[in-house]
Amino acid sequence: MTRDVIEAHQLTKRYGSLLAVDNVSFSVERGEIFSLLGHNGAGKTTTVEIIACLRSATSGEVRVFGYDVRDKGQAKKIKRLIGVMPQELNAIERLTIEENVKYPV
């Protein structure tokens, strides 16, 4: 069993001609504190959204706890294991906090 919680290999994301994430590779070991730093528009949010199975990569591979983010069945498992707090909250006003947290994406 790997000690890596997150493994990204040659991760790339394009939006048309815009290259948002350019061939990024990194790993995060269990218990390690890891940070993505960069200027606005550097691809940090896009990278986190790919890790959280909220966005698809154009190419490359990402595994979280050994699960492949590209596999829909494994993506459900990943979403149960991790949490992401976006910088802008998009809660549904008529739902309670608990209902918003449990709301399927």
Image: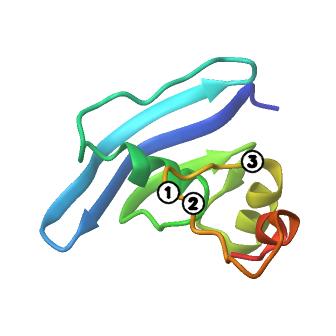
The type of residue carrying mark 1 is Glu
Q: Please, which residue is most extreme toward the front here?
A: 94
Expressed as whole percent of the image width and height from the top left, the position of residue 69 reads 62, 60
Disc 3 secondary structure class:
loop
Residue 71 located left or right of residue 9:
right
- Residue at label 1? 88
Report crowding for label 3: few under 14, some 14 to 19, many 20 or more residues within 10 A (C-alpha).
few
Residue 26 located left or right of residue 64:
left
Q: CA distance from mark 2 to mark 3?
A: 17 Å
- 1 and 2 marks in contact (CB < 8 Å): yes
The type of residue carrying mark 2 is Leu
User: Which residue is painted at 42% across and 62% down in the image?
Assistant: 57
User: Which residue is painted at 77% across and 72% down in the image?
Assistant: 73
Q: Quarter of the image holding residue 101?
A: bottom right
Picture disc at residue 89: 2
Q: CA distance from mark 1 to mark 2?
A: 4 Å
Expressed as whole percent of the image width and height from the top left, the position of residue 88 reads 49, 57
Q: How is the image coloured?
A: rainbow
Q: Please, which residue is most extreme toward the left here?
A: 17
Up the image or down, 40 lies above or below 3; here it is: below
- 3 and 1 marks in contact (CB < 8 Å): no
Which quarter of the image is occupied by the N terminus?
top right
Which quarter of the image is occupied by the C terminus?
bottom right
Along the viewing direction, whichever of 58 and 54 lies nearer the viewer: 54
Picture disc at residue 82: 3
Report crowding for label 2: few under 14, some 14 to 19, many 20 or more residues within 10 A (C-alpha).
few
